[in-house]
Image: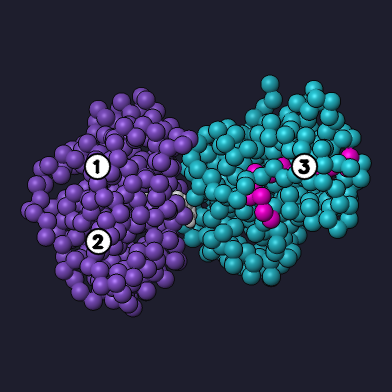
Amino acid sequence: MTEMIATRDGFGNELVELGKTNDKILVFSGDLEDATRAEYFKKAYPARFFNLGITEQDVVGTAAGASTLGFVTFATSFAVFLTNRAYDQIRMDVCYNNCNVKVVCSHAGLTVGQDGASAQCLEDFAIMRVLPNIRVICPVDNIEVCKATRTIVAENGPIYMRTSRAPLPVITQQSDPFVIGKANVMRDGKDVAIIACGIMVSESLAAAEILKGQGIDARVINMHTIKPIDKDAIIAAAKETGAVVTAEEHQMYGGLGSAVVEVLAQHQPVPVEMVAVADSFGESGTPEELLKAYHLKDVDIAQAVRKVIKRKK
Amino acid sequence: MPQAPDIQALKQKAFEFRKEILETLNLAGSGHPGGSLSAVEIMVALYFYKMQHRPTDPKWEDRDRMIVSKGHVSPVVYVTLANAGYFPKEELKRFRKMGSFLQGHVHVKTPGVEFNTGSLGHGLSVANGIAIGAKLLKKSFRTFCLMGDGELQEGSVWEAAMTAAHHKLDNVCAIVDYNQVQENGLISDIKNLEPLTTKWQSFGWHVLSVDGHDLSVLIAALDQAQATKDKPTVIIANTLKGKGVKFMELQAGWHGKAPNTQQLKDALEILERV
Ligand SMILES: Cc1ncc(C[n+]2csc(CCOP(=O)(O)OP(=O)(O)O)c2C)c(N)n1
Ligand SMILES: [Mg+2]
């Protein structure tokens, strides 16, 4: 059995580890540390943790201010509330001032589940990646989120990281590299490349299994960094397979798929199909029901692959 | 004006609503009990005394508007609307289920709900907009806005507070469910609101600070709000988060967690008649 762990848990645990040797880490919360798992840090280092209340703009601005004194500051909440509500603070205070702030948000995607559309952030990649200076990452599993948490503390500058509420299968190894901006090939293949992030990577691997039975050899790429996007991996995949499918738990517009298409259109045009939420809000349901209803399952990816292969010259 | 209220009958409703809220949450397996239980008397006083509304004609144009700014307390909203006759109570069993119109956070798919909410600190601006529009249209209906106390930490609430006072929106009545607890602890530990009465007064509001679990007092406050001209009124309803179930009262742990079947049984056994 594959182990299932939410990436928010790995983030919370790793931050406590890092706090042992790094007393420059400060964590700010918008009254959601229970949900983001920043509360692990709060319990371990209460003096370096601040619940500023239900005030997202204040959380981001304060994190930016503190960072100017050499602290590595974390602004934490649900993805909807920080990226949307505090957008101007992220743009001005964090990005324009190029502050060493890590915006780490849980509860992105439909897999937030029963809370419904108001909490299901489906636009964070789009609105974060358009801002200068910020890097945007979405770790794929518990092992990768721990590496990512270490990396974002070590790297200077603004970074947005999305974590999951839903438990995700652990599909990477301790020995796998994690470098911001360098995609990891999870499975090689020559007929098509599926470029995915987050929960959609394991769905893509499942799709590749389905496709194997149909004689289609699919490459699966874990694009854990949405910005800066790994151009080389995308161009190589397009050259070597001739067709690309993107898969993300995000709106169809502006996210990973768009970032991939921007590269392909300019450097290596090939047919592309995008698996994403088709310009709608979510709703209440279980994560699994929602992934099915919004066509984000392995079968949907496999169907997109068959479609894109037909379009190959 | 509404008839003299039968307080005993309203109290009985409040008791039954608490039971139904707990049952609804248990069946859903997730949701928000604390801020639902604290707002029961507020909702009863509004929907069964003060508000002009027609459950069989939810879009009646002269109805009073209710904006539930703390959209996570959908359980108390849906139980209230079902009991008022907006939809069959049977539907409560589908709360938070795929395809149900009873979404996790209040949504206009539900008959009787005016506005989608779920991100805190939006409702008062929306209520003001409705109130400004009503004045332009020479409509006499009133607009109510229910907010959480933690929600008042949002700066946008105070932007709206200035708007309502500046524009003399006496057709707006804000109600703060001052249950003392937000998601991760006590308001007074996380980001204190006090002095809350003078804060609202200094923003130009008529302020009534009342016992939010005493139906007669709430009803009197709602009447007084309506009688107050040239100023918006805020009713600070002093309540307890989780009211009625001793083990939930003032416990942040019961902000967003549904009772399991044993906990439901325990809760119903000790459920208090407020
Ligand atoms: C803008 C925003 N930030 C954070 C949240 C997450 N959240 C939902 S309820 C809640 C606590 C609300 O506390 P309070 O306003 O006191 O409500 P009540 O006690 O009545 O439940 C939080 C932080 C949210 N819904 N919206
Ligand atoms: Mg509260």
Whether A70 is drawn above or below A254: the answer is below
Q: Which mark is residue B199?
A: none
Q: Which residue is mark 1?
A: B85
- Indicate whether A115 appears above or below B229: above
| Residue bearing the label numbered 2 | B62
Between the C-alphas of marks 1 and 3, the distance is 49 Å
Q: In the visual, does A182 lie left or right of A140?
A: right
Circle 1 packing at 10 Å, graded few (<14), some (14-19), many (20+), is some
Residue depicted at 51% across the width and 47% down the height? A117
Q: Are marks 1 and 3 on the same chain?
A: no
The chain that hosts pointer 3 is A
Type of amino acid at the residue the image marks with label 3: Val
Q: Which residues are magenta?
A: A241-254
The answer for how far apart the CA atoms under marks 2 and 1 are is 18 Å
- Eye-nearest disc, 3 or 2: 2
Q: Quadrant of residue B251?
A: top left
Q: Report x, y in % for residue A5.
A: 63, 33
In the rendered structure, the colour chosen for chain B is purple
Q: Mark 3 touching mark 2, by CB under 8 A?
A: no
Chain shown in cyan: A
A119 in magenta: no
